[in-house]
Amino acid sequence: MSGEMDKPLISRCLIDSDGSLAEAPSGAPKVGILGSGDFARSLATRLVGSGFSVVVGSRNPKRTAGLFPASVQVTFQEEAVSSPEVIFVAVFREHYSTLCSLSDLLAGKILVDVSNPTEQEHLRHRESNAEFLASLFPTCTVVKAFNVISAWTLQAGPRDGNRQVPICSDQQEAKHVVSEMVRAMGFMPVDMGSLTSAREVEAMPLRLLPGWKVPTLLALGLFVCFYAYNFIRDVLQPYVQEGKNKFYKLPVSVVNTTLPCVAYVLLSLVYLPGVLAATLQLQWGTKYRRFPDWLDHWLQHRKQIGLLSFFCAALHALYSFCLPLRRSHRYELINMAVKQVLANKSHLWVEEEVWRMEIYLSLGVLALGTLSLLAVTSLPSIANSLNWREFSFVQK
Ligand SMILES: NC(=O)C1=CN([C@@H]2O[C@H](COP(=O)(O)OP(=O)(O)OC[C@H]3O[C@@H](n4cnc5c(N)ncnc54)[C@H](OP(=O)(O)O)[C@@H]3O)[C@@H](O)[C@H]2O)C=CC1
Ligand SMILES: [Cu+2]
């Protein structure tokens, strides 16, 4: 693990420049941390900043001591775990068993499991990391917490979106002790029940982005299908039947015909599951029955599908604005002008072109107006909610 030590997440100067971290008040509650990696360093800094006295247990305290705030005591694992009642295990699951020699010293204490499995690990092990830790240390109480908080967030302080810390344990008292620590550090504990929920808690960080996977694949699939159709219709067919070369249409024109198709279909897929769900409920005559899994998932992905639909529509608008910039468009106009001159007509007035630009412009102005109106009206409420959050944060 020496590689990680070369690039500490918390730089020395940051620790030293912060005077408040230089010394912990005497009589502060003592907390132990096993491990001296990124997470341990951020956690130690945050704990010291929240008024705790911290002792870190490392296999090589000499090498790692310099990476922690001055007030943190860095020592060997045996010494670090002897006095605190709460000990954070900031070590990866595969190294848990190397801690077994501390078993006697740890008896009766609270172990906080902060670990996060990778997706493969999560699928491979049926039992959660926290339950595995509990099985290794049957005389300890294991609490699962902090795994959803990144080392970076710990260091930078809680933000609105990610203040919640799910906690679970089989022992109410231990859960209470850790919850109070979570509060003291500026986060919000969320009780997730007994330790059997740990698997679910460990899956949370894995689930944040995959919510986009299916909708994105769906949008891409639709795009490919519609693009193929439009290519055949607008390019291939004229080429085969009339010998016209319209391949220049591929990058802009065909894409721009495809985008609204995708946007419309995605938008309809946002509303369709709601209709299906209502139909099912009417058919069942009750709303107290679970929907089938596929419908449940579909309902949960509506937001992402809707946003992708909006994205396609926005791209379509952008492409449409750019259509008159194309060279092919200019040639068309010149061709038309020449034809008109040859036909001896007095002035060049292309009805469709004129109308198209008028409509684009008026839509653009309308959209801009609406957006600025929305911005002006929602600014006070945004400011308000920000203030409120600041206030509620200070109150805690
Ligand atoms: N980094 C993050 O943002 C987050 C991390 N976590 C969890 O925190 C835990 C630690 O992560 P992180 O700090 O990033 O990892 P690091 O690799 O940076 O640190 C792991 C630490 O484990 C210690 N350790 C103890 N025994 C062993 C051993 N036998 N072999 C190797 N190392 C050992 C080492 O400390 P020493 O050499 O001093 O003994 C090492 O510094 C993991 O379980 C991770 O899932 C959870 C949420 C976020
Ligand atoms: Cu359109």
Image (tube, helix red, strand yellow):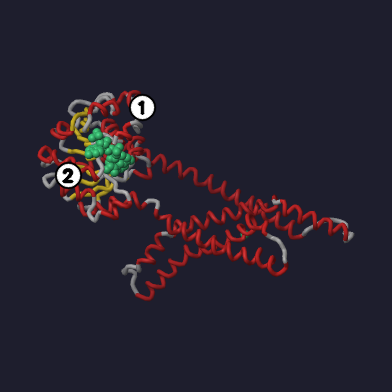
Q: Position of residue 348 (x, y in %)?
A: 82, 56
**As drawn, 314 above or below 10:** below
Identity of the amino acid at label 2?
Ala
Question: Which quadrant holds the C terminus?
Answer: top left
Disc 2 element = helix
Rate crowding at label 2 as few (under 14), some (14 to 19) or many (20 or more) other CA atoms within 10 Å. Answer: some
* Ligand 1 found in image quarter: top left
Residue 190 percent location from the top left of the image: 27, 48
Give the CA distance from mark 2 to mark 1. 33 Å
Q: Position of residue 219 (x, y in %)?
A: 50, 59
Cβ of mark 1 under 8 Å from ligand 1: the answer is: no
Q: Which residue is mark 1?
A: 14
Q: Amino acid at mark 1?
A: Leu
Residue for point 23% across, 52% down:
128
**Quarter of image, res 21:** top left
Look at mark 2 in the image and give the residue it sits on. 174
SS class of the residue under badge 1? helix
Q: What residue is at 46 percent from the left and 45 percent from the top?
A: 381
**Image height of 380 relative to 360, above or below:** above
